[in-house]
Amino acid sequence: MATKKILKKELDQKVSADREETEKNEIEKTQHYFYAVGRRKTSVARVKIFPKKKSGFSLLINGKKNEDFFSIKRLIPLAESPLTLVGEKNGFDAEVKVSGGGINSQAEATRLAIARALVVFDKDFKKILKAQGFLTRDSRKVERKKPGLKKARKSPQWAKR
């Protein structure tokens, strides 16, 4: 009976130590990043940018490297362009969770989110990013289909007889 109590006590101590360690790691993570959301069409990108701790730049999108995520190569610099513009590409690491839409709108949503996160980090970046249009949300979306029409605006072909 006494050994059961001792084993239970040791187990409780290990569990509480593990909890403290995970809480400590979570607190460190949450205190050292800047968060923002970017949208385009139906895509939503949630970005966390971390000030640099290691050398090199990494942009993880849904757990993948940006080169692996974006199959079209011209979208890679599009998503990274706010960091390149302010000259801080090697100063940050970024994690992105993006959902909805196609890959082009996901890249543009990522660009907007990174630009917004940079402004949260440093207000001086706002003037530079605003001048290039990186802080303006492109609100265009697909127009809905109306009843009696084939598409949003295309009507059926008119027949005289």
Image: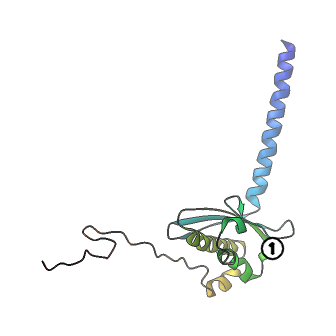
What is the secondary structure assignment of the residue under circle 1?
helix
Please report the residue visible at 83 percent of the width from the left and 38 percent of the height from the top. Answer: 17
Please report the residue visible at 12 percent of the width from the left and 77 percent of the height from the top. Answer: 161
Drawn side of residue 24 relative to residue 37, left or right? right
Please report the residue visible at 59 percent of the width from the left and 84 percent of the height from the top. Answer: 133
How crowded is the residue under tag 1: few (<14 C-alpha within 10 Å), some, or many (20+)?
some
Q: Nearer the viewer, residue 114 or 32?
A: 114
Specify the quadrant of the image occupied by residue 129. bottom right
Q: Is residue 147 visible?
A: yes
Please report the residue visible at 60 percent of the width from the left and 65 percent of the height from the top. Answer: 45
**What amino acid does circle 1 point to?**
Gly
- Colour scheme shown: rainbow
- Residue 57, above or below 9: below
Residue 57, position in %: x, y? 80, 70
Specify the quadrant of the image occupied by residue 82. bottom right
Residue 68, position in %: x, y? 70, 65
Q: How many marks?
A: 1
Q: Nearer the viewer, residue 152 or 128?
A: 152
Residue tagged by mark 1? Answer: 91
Residue situated furthest bottom in the rendering: 131
Residue 87, position in %: x, y? 77, 81
Residue 135, position in %: x, y? 60, 79
